[in-house]
């Protein structure tokens, strides 16, 4: 961190969305958002077939390039991320793009560049008004493909990052997934964009590649010059332009201190998650992609407490087959055996959509056709997944859990389908684990409040606090305008957690957490004090949560929980948690600033 502030430039602090963690400081490599201009040309009758051929060659070349990028991504970070480029190929295969362009070249006698830009503008406009985050974000995919086609039409072989020679922080209006995938980690220290959100493929790719990133900065590209010094915190979502000595020291120190604390926790990898007074809990990890299994082991988690299986369904044009799913679940089970892998049945709807599944347009998708509701309405899709989970269960310790359950009837119906699948496999002499344990995610207040009833039908509960908080407090979890009201430590949420744990224990079943609240070290003693048996957290958070568990006694945790349950506000609860953390593990406070 030796970068200097240019004389006379005041420090400017910009806030966006931190989508990939890490603190970096470097010089800006600015990608101009100005599109190359293409002259509009009218063709003679004789030139039309030649122009169509030129366009078709550019499409073929684009497809070749996308295949090559897809192969690279697959090699570098795995098949599931590589599937993102299926969407790009779909754009090229879609009649609305290629055929419409050819039709227009013929009808308007216009050059291919002009036609492509017109078709893309209409496509993007149609998608941008759709009330569906996933589809809206596909505008970036369409533009990405069109940019390639245009570049290939002009014969231009350069890439937007070809000019990048020194390690820099890339700043651009937007970065397409394929551009993100071609970022070379040795040259790109981090990137910042005007647009973007946490659910975009670009954000997913940045995290998978381990490149710090802040997106959604508004008009950062207009506020920067190439070569400006910027300091970026990918955790907090902050970009500081012309950082002052004080900020450089603060963040430099912060990064060093955070790194030192994290390194200091490495020795816990093979230690158990046991409280100071010897009470053992289970500490597992959440995964979205199979490639994260290496992290699960590296960070010392015991198994997988949440496998978000819907990522097998997303970013592809068809549904994953039963055999494909068996391969994925079996791989997880075998790699982590004898530890357990909990597969959450597909949670589509809300903000996650699969191209192969027609979902209705809804005004309140988070309150609509989502997760178990979708599965029970589409029993064929559900049965395929249940059979795959059962078949994979013969190869390791697999458990299954249902998301977004709001009443016991849903659990009974899902269990009946599972029983049918078991009978079918038995008839066909296919092996599976007869003892496969079924659980329910507690994500809706009605499920928490009737958890005594639900407990009669399952072997465990997993608190999905990301949703439990949004449904309890009526705060949309992806709406940044009401983000200040999204409070996992709200006493109402704590009371629902306590009810769930008490009801689970009264029925003799264990209760875990797989929502983000479990990855917050400040909350660890509180959750232990409420009686939690299992934590499933982001893989990189495993060491810090283990450290908290090992530093607290059950008596301290219970006393904290009692006081928190009597508190009036989330702020009071957080303060109680801070005071205890300052006493038992003060260095951890540095990681949560
Ligand atoms: C949750 O809601 O807490 C959860 C783990 O599920 P998701 O975040 O995938 O909705
Ligand atoms: Mg959820």
Image: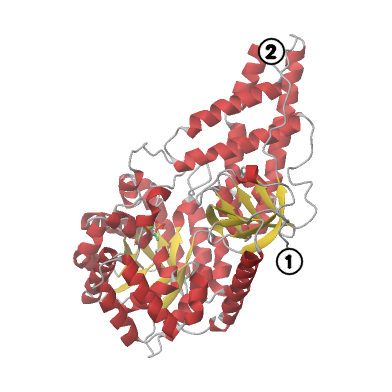
Residue drawn 73% across and 61% down? 4
Checking the image for residue 2, the label placed there is 1
10 Å crowding of disc 1: few (<14), some (14-19), many (20+): few
Quadrant where the N terminus is found in the figure: bottom right
Checking the image for residue 583, the label placed there is none
Residue 16 rendering spot, x and y as whole percentages: 53, 52
Per the image, the residue denoted by label 2 is 109
Residue 458 rendering spot, x and y as whole percentages: 27, 67
Please, is residue 201 above or below residue 508 in the view? above
Q: Is residue 76 visible?
A: yes
Quarter of the image holding residue 496? bottom left
Q: Is mark 2 within 8 Å of ligand 1?
A: no
Q: How many marks?
A: 2
- Please identify the residue farthest to the front as the structure is shown: 8
Q: Nearer the viewer, residue 449 or 358?
A: 449
What element does badge 2 sit on? loop
| Position of residue 75 in the picture relative to residue 383 (left or right) | right
Q: Is the C-beta separation of discs 1 and 2 under 8 Å?
A: no
Answer with mark 1 or mark 2, whichever residue precedes in sequence: 1
- Please identify the residue farthest to the bottom as the structure is shown: 277
10 Å crowding of disc 2: few (<14), some (14-19), many (20+): some
| Position of residue 279 in the picture relative to residue 540 (left or right) | left
Quarter of the image holding residue 388? bottom left
Residue drawn 41% across and 89% down? 276
Residue drawn 53% across and 61% down? 236
Q: Nearer the viewer, residue 503 or 220?
A: 220
Q: Is residue 96 visible?
A: no
Residue drawn 66% across and 65% down? 245
Q: Nearer the viewer, residue 419 or 236?
A: 236
Q: Is mark 1 within 8 Å of ligand 1?
A: no
What element does badge 1 sit on? loop
Please, is residue 372 above or below residue 123 in the view? below
């Amino acid at each position: 961190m030796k970068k200097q502030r240019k004389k006379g430039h005041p420090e400017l602090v910009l806030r966006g969305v931190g989508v990939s963690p890490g603190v970096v400081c470097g010089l800006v490599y600015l990608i101009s958002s100005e599109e190359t201009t293409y002259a509009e040309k009218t063709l003679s009758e004789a030139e039309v077939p030649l122009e169509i051929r030129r366009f078709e060659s550019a499409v073929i070349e684009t497809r070749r390039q996308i295949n090559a990028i897809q192969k690279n991504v697959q090699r570098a970070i795995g098949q599931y991320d590589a599937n993102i480029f299926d969407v790009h190929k779909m754009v090229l295969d879609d009649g609305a793009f290629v055929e419409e362009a050819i039709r227009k070249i013929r009808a308007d006698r216009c050059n291919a560049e002009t036609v492509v830009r017109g078709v893309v503008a209409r496509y993007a406009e149609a998608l941008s008004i759709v009330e569906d985050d996933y589809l809206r974000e596909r505008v970036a995919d369409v533009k990405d493909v069109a940019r390639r086609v245009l570049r290939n039409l002009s014969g231009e072989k350069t890439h937007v990052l070809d000019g990048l020679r020194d390690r820099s922080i890339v700043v651009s209006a937007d970065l397409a997934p394929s551009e993100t995938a071609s970022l070379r980690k040795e040259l790109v220290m981090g990137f910042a964009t005007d647009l973007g959100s946490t659910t975009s493929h670009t954000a997913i790719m940045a995290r998978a590649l381990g490149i710090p990133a802040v997106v959604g900065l508004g008009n950062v590209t207009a506020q920067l010059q190439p070569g400006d010094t910027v300091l970026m915190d990918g955790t907090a979502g902050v970009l500081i332009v012309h950082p002052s000595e004080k900020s450089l020291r603060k963040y430099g120190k912060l990064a060093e201190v955070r790194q030192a604390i994290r390194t200091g926790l490495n020795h816990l990898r093979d230690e158990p998650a046991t409280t100071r007074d010897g009470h053992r809990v289970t500490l597992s990890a959440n995964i979205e992609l199979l490639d994260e299994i290496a992290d699960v082991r590296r960070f010392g988690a015991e198994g997988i407490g949440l496998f978000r299986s819907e990522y097998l369904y997303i970013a592809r044009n068809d549904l994953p087959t039963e055999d494909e799913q068996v391969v994925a679940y079996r791989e997880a089970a075998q790699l982590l055996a004898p530890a357990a892998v909990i597969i959450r049945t597909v949670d589509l709807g809300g903000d996650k959509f699969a191209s192969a599944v027609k979902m209705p347009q809804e005004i309140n998708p988070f309150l609509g056709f989502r997760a178990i509701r979708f599965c029970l309405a589409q029993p064929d899709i559900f049965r395929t997944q249940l059979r795959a989970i059962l078949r994979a269960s013969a190869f390791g310790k697999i458990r299954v859990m249902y998301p977004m359950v709001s009443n016991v009837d849903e659990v009974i119906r899902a269990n009946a389908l599972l029983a049918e699948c078991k009978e079918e496999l038995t008839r066909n002499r296919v092996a599976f684990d007869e003892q496969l344990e079924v659980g329910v995610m507690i994500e809706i207040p009605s499920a928490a409040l009737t958890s005594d009833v639900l407990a009669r039908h399952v072997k465990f509960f997993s608190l999905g606090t990301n949703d439990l908080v949004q449904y309890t407090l009526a705060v949309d979890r992806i709406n940044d305008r009401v983000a200040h009201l999204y409070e996992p430590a709200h006493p109402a949420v704590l009371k629902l957690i306590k009810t769930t744990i008490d009801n689970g224990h009264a029925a003799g079943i264990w209760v875990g957490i797989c929502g983000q609240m479990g990855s917050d070290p400040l909350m660890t003693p509180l959750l232990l004090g409420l009686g939690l048996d299992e934590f499933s957290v982001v893989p990189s958070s495993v060491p810090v949560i283990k450290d908290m568990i090992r530093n607290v006694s059950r008596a301290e945790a219970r006393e904290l929980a009692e006081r928190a349950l009597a508190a009036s506000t989330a702020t009071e609860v957080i303060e109680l948690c801070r005071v205890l953390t300052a006493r038992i593990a003060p260095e951890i406070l540095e990681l949560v600033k």
